[in-house]
Amino acid sequence: MLNRGHIYLIGILFFSILSSCKEEIPPIQFLRFDQDLFDPSTVNREEHYKKLQGKYGDFFTSFAQEMLNISEEERSQFYQPSMSLFVKYPTIVQLKKEVDSVFQSTKDIESELQGAMQIFHDKFKDEKIPCFITFISEFGYANITMDTVVGIGLDMYLGNKYPIYPALEFPDFMIAKLRKEYLVANTIKAFAIGKYENQLTDKRFLAMMLFEGKVRFMMKELLPNVSDTLIFACSQEQLNWGKQNEGMIWKHLVQNKMLFNVEPNQYMRYFNDGPFTIATGVPQESMPAMGVFCGYKIIEKYMKENPSITLQELMANSNWDGLLKNSYYKPE
């Protein structure tokens, strides 16, 4: 007959065996297109751009045509004429040096994304893990998504002291977030939005609010150690305001009949970034995009009320009325 000590020991061993059976994913694909593009030994040769096309596929084509606006007519030449001018242009050369100085190493970024993708794999068993590709677009894009690629515009994460951002007339609230600290959170946000944005066929405020709430919930699941200030892109003071005024936010949205509004030009102020939520009746100490925060709180409540629902099931669910109803959301 086994005594309690033996049972406890067997339990520990069984748990250890289960833990050791966890399927670890291979290293994520993290490709430095920004470095490959500027290879100094080959930048003027068509063969170089042919190789880039082969390695990066549709991303290379998208970078040339959509980010750099190079004519389709150059496709047969792998965009070599215009691409060669781009990589030699003095301001671009200087920008490349500045990006290199901030991102001498991307090991920490790769490690964080590896951890996020391990959690993603654990919760979305059959889903393909994306490839992450860094690039420079001369301040055009922070992140892009296409198929199973997530692009990271490193020149949009050079720090809030970077002198070119004010020269480009970027607003202060935006410059405050153009920091390396935001890169991983923004990348996972772009990944989540790109994966599920086809759900946004319903034009109601409610649909946008709960979609954005699901995205933030997924971000928090995949990035458990990332600060909520990075998840919600606000200061700690603004985040505290949101938590302390959750009931007021909900009351404001209901009283202003926003939930079933189908005019984005009337409600996007509740989702857009800014110094605060710029809407009638909302104080300046508010957090920006408080519609996003409210959407997250509803989704958080829904998941607490329905503990058997997996993250994958949540993200696949676009029954916005059902999500709201089954959240039993009634903040004080």
Image (cartoon, rainbow, N blue to C red):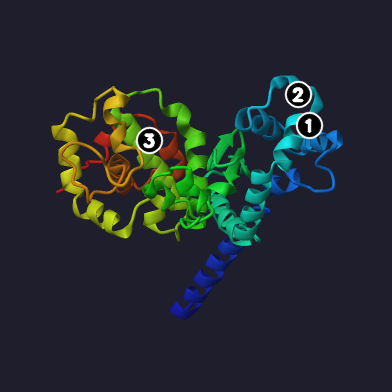
Specify the amino acid type for callout 2: Glu
Residue for badge 1? 80
Of discs 3 and 2, which sits in the foreground?
Answer: 2
Nearest the viewer among 304 and 183 is 183
Of discs 3 and 1, which sits in the foreground?
Answer: 1
Q: Residues within 10 Å of mark 2 (few under 14, many from 20)?
A: some
- Along the polypeptide, which appears first: circle 1 or circle 2? 2
Q: Residue at x 47, y 80 (%)?
A: 5
- Along the polypeptide, which appears first: circle 3 or circle 1? 1
Specify the amino acid type for callout 1: Gln
SS at badge 1 = helix
The residues bearing labels 1 and 2 have C-alpha atoms spaced at a distance of: 7 Å
**In this view of the protein, can residue 29 be seen by the observer?**
no
- Along the polypeptide, which appears first: circle 3 or circle 2? 2
The residues bearing labels 3 and 1 have C-alpha atoms spaced at a distance of: 41 Å
Q: Position of residue 232 (x, y in %)?
A: 37, 49
Residue 211's disc is 3
Q: Are marks 3 and 2 in contact (CB under 8 Å)?
A: no
SS at badge 3 = helix
72 relative position to 255: left or right: right
Specify the amino acid type for callout 3: Phe
SS at badge 2 = helix
Q: Residues within 10 Å of mark 1 (few under 14, many from 20)?
A: many
276 relative position to 158: left or right: left
Q: Are marks 1 and 2 in contact (CB under 8 Å)?
A: yes
Q: Position of residue 248 (x, y in %)?
A: 16, 45
